Amino acid sequence: MSHNETTCWTVDLGLIRYGPACALQRQLVEARKAHVIPDVLLFCEHPHVITIGRNGNPQHLRASLRSLERMRVELHSSDRGGDVTYHGPGQITAYPIVDLAEHRRDIRWYVEQLEEVMIRTSAELGVVAKRVPGCHGVWIDGVAGEEKIGALGVHISRWVTSHGFAYNVSADLRYFDLIVPCGIAGKGVSSLERARGRSVSLDEVRARLASDFSIVFNRHLQPIRPTQLAEELIARQEMAPGTLTSIAQR
């Protein structure tokens, strides 16, 4: 599959567990470093999982391990930045594998661009979202004050990004009671569905996020299926020996 420097593959992985999603990202990061693939934007949903970033405080986990097991919520440590967060159905998680050397070598700029994507998509869907000074992510004004609608946590290796953002569309917000979201006490969490007062399809939101990502990062998105992505990585393995493995297992 041909590409140029302005191409970005976009892949909808569907529902995938957190561990395999991280393994896939690691493979894509190595391939991106080797310049054998273009930028990639992964979309997915995760089964219920709580992740603790490399700067995370375990005390921000409010539930016991036994409670998590009973509720079938996985717990994972992560090499992303940030503290404790929750992922689950009804939340669109986006993992951009982007070479910032071809954009701008500036982590703050990159984080702000991801926020901009979520802010634009929110506005297009009738919700005013904003940044809050000193707090990463995207927020709305809710009944109880500022509430987070989109969370961020990224990892950078030789200017290639992984992890990314999670945007609450129709997520069950009760699961956020299991944690202090992103380590910020006293602030609430919301979703697009709650803010709009009516439902919205995940497909529509995903399409808008992709479109806004394309605009913000000035990339032409080329949708490919997960099977195509696996085939492309295998085909490129000879170009970067020892760095790529199969992603067929989830």
Image: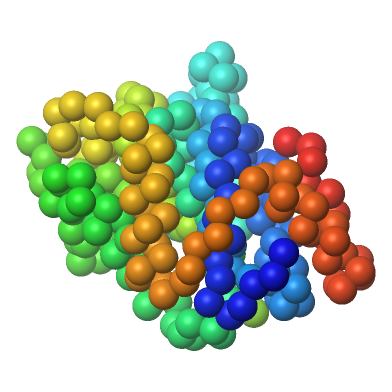
Quadrant of the image occupied by residue 194: top left
Relative height, residue 11 to residue 89 (above, below): below
User: Looking at this view, is 19 or 116 the one in front?
Assistant: 116
Quadrant of the image occupied by residue 175: top left
Relative height, residue 95 to residue 30 (above, below): above
Left-right relation of 245 to 81 = right
User: Looking at this view, is 209 or 149 the one in front?
Assistant: 209
Name the colouring of the figure: rainbow
What residue lies at 61% left-to-right and 78% top-to-bottom? 4
What residue lies at 14% left-to-right and 28% top-to-bottom? 197
Residue 96: x, y in percent?
53, 61
Residue 217: x, y in percent?
41, 72
What residue lies at 64% left-to-right and 46% top-to-bottom? 225
**Furthest residue in direction top, as rendered:** 70
Residue 191: x, y in percent?
26, 36
Left-right relation of 67 to 22 = left
Residue 29: x, y in percent?
68, 66
User: Looking at this view, is 186 or 164 the one in front?
Assistant: 164
Relative height, residue 225 to residue 190 (above, below): below
Question: Can the viewer see residue 60?
Answer: no
Question: Can the viewer see residue 39?
Answer: yes
**Furthest residue in direction front, as rendered:** 2
User: Looking at this view, is 181 or 208 the one in front?
Assistant: 208
Quadrant of the image occupied by residue 176: top left
Left-right relation of 164 to 162 = left
**Quadrant of the rendering where the C terminus is positioned:** top right
**Quadrant of the rendering where the N terminus is positioned:** bottom right
- Total marks placed: 0
What residue lies at 37% left-to-right and 58% top-to-bottom? 211
